[in-house]
């Protein structure tokens, strides 16, 4: 599953991005819009429903056109609204049993498949919640198609991320052991859809398969991350967390640091200026020789 994530502080910008996604044939059931504002959800739902020719279903007063469902009272956040055909499934993942019930209820009303009890939550759920806490909204595209992911990523990048630098440097990921139980991944180049995101995914998966669950992601030579790259970093974080491990981001370049702040990833990831502090943060048992 490929995930592209756009973070917005303006409903107008989010609406423009959604329209462009639909006009470029990104499937309706791959797109979800998340916000804490009911009025924003309703207004955007009506507008995009018209552009799309009508999304399937309807709820909370939208009439025919869009699904907009309320996930009642997530602790620490409150009310959340998800708009889009994929809203019902996503609501079932985002935090509480109440959310699962709402997701199933919307699915029943709209004939959209609800999540089953054995389905895993999207790796990005924690990021979604952290962004919503700040009052920003998200457009999330989740698809199995590399071609659709590339289109979606390009659109969301233009809407939310600084322009990609003119470079042909493909991503490289070199693994090294930095201390007992701690591995570092030196990332260079671009973490972008169809290239770097796949390299990063395979590198982290191999580390986990080999039992390495304390990982440093060294990003000082990363030139660019697109919206799919954002999704991939969150996926890596969640993959390691699921096996009771930890991922630390080390020495991000200025552009990466800017992106982490823009997307609220710095609230989800543990970011360090240097390897010594990152290693120390794992605990004394995994500290590098000579550190305390």
Image (cartoon, rainbow, N blue to C red):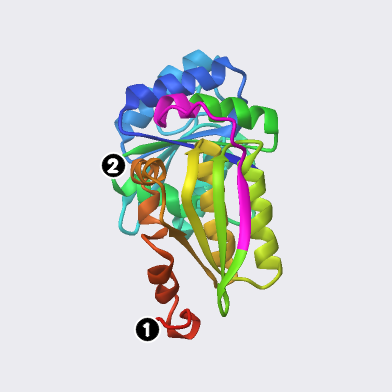
Q: Residue at x 51, y 31 (%)?
A: 84
Looking at the image, residue 223 sits to the left or right of residue 263; the answer is right
76 or 235, which is in the foreground? Answer: 235
Residue 277 x %, y %: 38, 70
Q: Which residues are magenta?
A: 156-175
Q: Residues within 10 Å of mark 1 (few under 14, many from 20)?
A: few
Residue highlighted by disc 2: 135
Mark 2: give few (<14), some (14-19) or many (20+) Cα within 10 Å: few
Q: CA distance from mark 1 to mark 2?
A: 39 Å
Report the residue at 65% width, 28% height from top. Answer: 148
Q: Indicate left or right for 105 with 282 as reference.
A: right
Q: Is residue 127 left or right of residue 182?
A: left
| Residue 12 found in image quarter | top left
Residue under numbered circle 1: 292
Residue 132: x %, y % from top left: 35, 45
As for residue 80 lying within the magenta part, the answer is no
In the displayed structure, 145 sits above or below 270; it is: above
Q: Nearer the viewer, residue 158 or 51?
A: 158
Q: Is residue 151 above or below residue 282?
A: above
1 or 2: tag closer to the N-terminus: 2
Residue placed most toward the observer, 292 or 203: 292
Quarter of the figure with residue 47? top left
Q: Is residue 117 visible?
A: no
Which is nearer the eye, 220 or 261? Answer: 220
Q: Residue at x 62, y 47 (%)?
A: 172
Is 157 covered by the magenta stretch?
A: yes
């Amino acid at each position: 599953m490929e995930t592209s994530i756009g973070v917005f502080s303006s409903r107008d910008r989010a609406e423009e991005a959604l329209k462009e996604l639909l006009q470029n044939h990104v499937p309706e059931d791959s797109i979800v819009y998340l916000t804490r504002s009911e009025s924003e959800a309703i207004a955007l739902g009506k507008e995009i429903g018209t552009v799309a020719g009508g999304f399937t279903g309807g709820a909370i007063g939208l009439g025919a056109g869009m699904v907009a469902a309320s996930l009642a009272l997530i602790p620490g956040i409150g009310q959340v609204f998800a708009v889009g055909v994929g809203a019902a499934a996503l609501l079932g993942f985002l935090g509480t049993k109440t959310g699962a019930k709402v997701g199933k209820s919307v699915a029943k009303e709209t004939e959209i498949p609800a999540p089953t009890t054995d389905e895993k939550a999207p790796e990005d759920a924690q990021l979604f919640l952290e962004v919503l806490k700040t009052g920003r909204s998200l457009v999330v595209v989740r698809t199995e198609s590399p071609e659709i992911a590339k289109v979606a990523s390009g659109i969301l990048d233009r809407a939310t991320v600084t322009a990609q630098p003119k470079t042909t440097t493909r991503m490289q990921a070199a693994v090294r052991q930095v201390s007992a139980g701690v591995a570092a991944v030196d990332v260079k180049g671009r973490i972008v859809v169809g290239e770097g995101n796949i390299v990063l995914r395979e590198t982290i998966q191999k580390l986990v398969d080999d039992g390495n669950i304390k990982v440093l992601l060294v990003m000082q030579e990363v030139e660019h991350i697109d919206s799919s790259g954002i999704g991939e970093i969150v996926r890596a974080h969640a993959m390691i967390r699921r096996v009771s491990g930890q991922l630390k981001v080390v020495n991000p370049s200025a552009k990466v640091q800017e992106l982490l702040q823009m997307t609220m990833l710095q609230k989800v990831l543990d970011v360090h200026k240097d390897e010594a502090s990152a290693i120390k943060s794992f605990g004394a048992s995994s500290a590098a020789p000579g550190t305390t």
